Amino acid sequence: MPGLVMSTRLSVRFALTKPACGRHGSENPSSRNKIPALNIKVSKINNRVALLISFPMAGIYIHIPFCRRACHYCDFYFSTNRHNQAQVIHAMVQEMHLQQTYLPEKIIETVYIGGGTPSLIDHTLLAEIFNALYKNFSVSPHAEVTLEANPDDLTLQALSFYASLGVNRLSIAYSRFMTPRLFS
């Protein structure tokens, strides 16, 4: 990444106990143990036979463009003006409704909520995003659901809330763990 401050993302996985009925509403028992079919392809690469095996997977990325402050090394679209958060989130919810047929009959295996700083937005707005996601798309009960977060936004209450939404993975941003060097 460009800039003087090294930026890295640290992935943290935490285990959750899934409610018997699934995250939101009743779970479809037929999708509980469904494993996607394998794509198997035999190719000849440099006079050698290669067996390429892949799982077809559908995923959704949702970009939350709000940040506490501008980082000089960030190339993503963001805004430090958070006054219109509700309008932007409501537009995202509407867009999910409009795009609900984009992935017909696909089970979503990965969800990534990135940004910006998704952990910065109001919890009721984040809940609206997740409610629209589960309402408009078939998200697997075993999906990897990642939320980008800043360490200072992570309280026990926030972690519990994220878990209630189905988040089972955090991508935590940090610049440096040694504060004096960060500001020198």
Image (tube, helix red, strand yellow):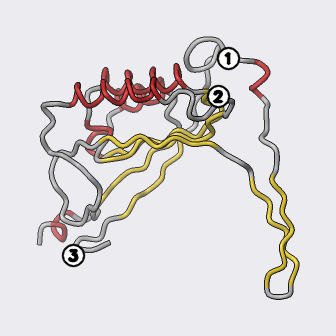
Residue at 84% in and 63% down: 41
The location of residue 9, given as percent across then percent down, is: 40, 59
For disc 2, the neighbor class at 10 Å (few under 14, some 14 to 19, many from 20) is many
Residue depicted at 21% across the width and 45% down the height: 67
* Residue of label 1: 27
Residue 61 is marked as none
Q: Residues within 10 Å of mark 3 (few under 14, many from 20)?
A: few
Give the mark nearest the N terminus, 3 or 1: 3
Q: Is residue 44 left or right of residue 6?
A: right
Q: Kindly report which numbered mark, 3 or 1, lies closer to the viewer in this rendering.
A: 1
Which residue is labeled 3 in the image?
4
Percent position (x, y) of residue 26? 64, 12
Check the picture and name the quadrant holding the N terminus: bottom left
Q: What amino acid is at disc 1?
A: Glu
Residue 180, compared with residue 139, is above or below; it is: below
SS of the residue at dot 1?
loop
Amino acid type, mark 2:
Pro
- Say whether marks 2 and 1 touch (CB < 8 Å): yes
